[in-house]
Amino acid sequence: MSMIASLAVIGAGFAAGAVNTMVGSGSLITYPVMVLLGVPPVTANIANTVGLVPGSIAGAWGYRDKLAGTKKLLLRLGAASLSGAVVGAALLTQLPKGAFALVVPVLILGAAVLVGLQPVIIKRTRPAAGTRWGQLTAWVFLSGVYGGYFSAAQGVILLGLLGVFLASGLQEQNAVKNVLQALVNIVAAIFFIIVGTVAWQYAGLVAIGSLVGAPVGAALAKRIPTAGFRIGIVIFGVLMAVVMAFMARS
């Protein structure tokens, strides 16, 4: 790999680490860069998942001050994310990439809309506690399946779900999202290391960049007012839906 290509992957990893911590969808930066450099799509997807693990952990750590009182929530949703990630990673070895590529843009767009309409939805819906927990757990499991298969925009999807079912603020929801996202990436990466072939050169470069970028993203995200943060998530989500729709057709 040339020096320019190496720097491009590190730079993409830095940007992905920051974006993942702030919103999610950082994989839509690293994944296309590796594909453009000639890495086969599935290989790039696996290297991307493994490489973003350090950044995911760093991002979750950077948001630890927003996790007060969430232990019970994280235990329940974490178990759902972990089990979903195993299923999703296993599917990657069995299903063609196009199976999910067709629905990914719809998922991202729907999640962005959920984030944008969160205040209105919360005011108009008051589901029973048991129903709320059951539905949220089921949806988080499915987001784990998606994240284990193809991690791009998992964060946007999780933020959309958490915003509908939880009464906490957006920054607190983002902290929970970062933990769940990290768990999915770790489990999927372990699965790929055991059963798949990891392109370690690319994964290592992504890891270096994401490890530096994630704390930067955490620091920036916590300085943004809630309204501006919400608008940014919606805009980014819509843009990523368009990007993924274009990639699915190419």
Image (spheres, rainbow, N blue to C red):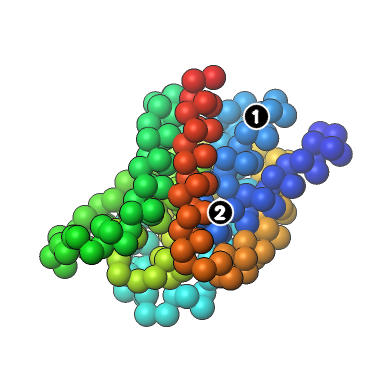
Label 2, secondary structure: give it. Answer: helix
Compared across the picture, whether 59 is left or right of 81 comes to: right
Res 118 quadrant in image:
bottom left
Q: Quadrant of the N terminus?
A: top right
Q: Nearer the viewer, residue 243 or 190?
A: 243
Q: Position of residue 141 (x, y in %)?
A: 32, 51
Q: CA distance from mark 2 to mark 1?
A: 19 Å
Q: Which of these two is toward me, 155 or 169?
A: 169
Q: What residue is drawn where x is 69% and y is 28%? A: 36
State which quadrant residue 197 falls in. top right
Residue 6 shown left or right of residue 158 in the figure: right
Rendering coords of residue 188 (x, y %): 48, 47
**Sequence-wise first label, 2 or 1:** 2
Q: Is residue 155 left or right of residue 15?
A: left
Q: Amino acid at mark 1?
A: Val
Residue 35 tag number: 1
Q: At x 25% / y 52%, what residue is drawn? A: 138
Q: Which mark is residue 211?
A: none
The tag on residue 20 is 2
Residue under the point 74% across and 47% down: 11
Q: Quadrant of the C terminus?
A: top right
The amino acid beneath tag 2 is Asn
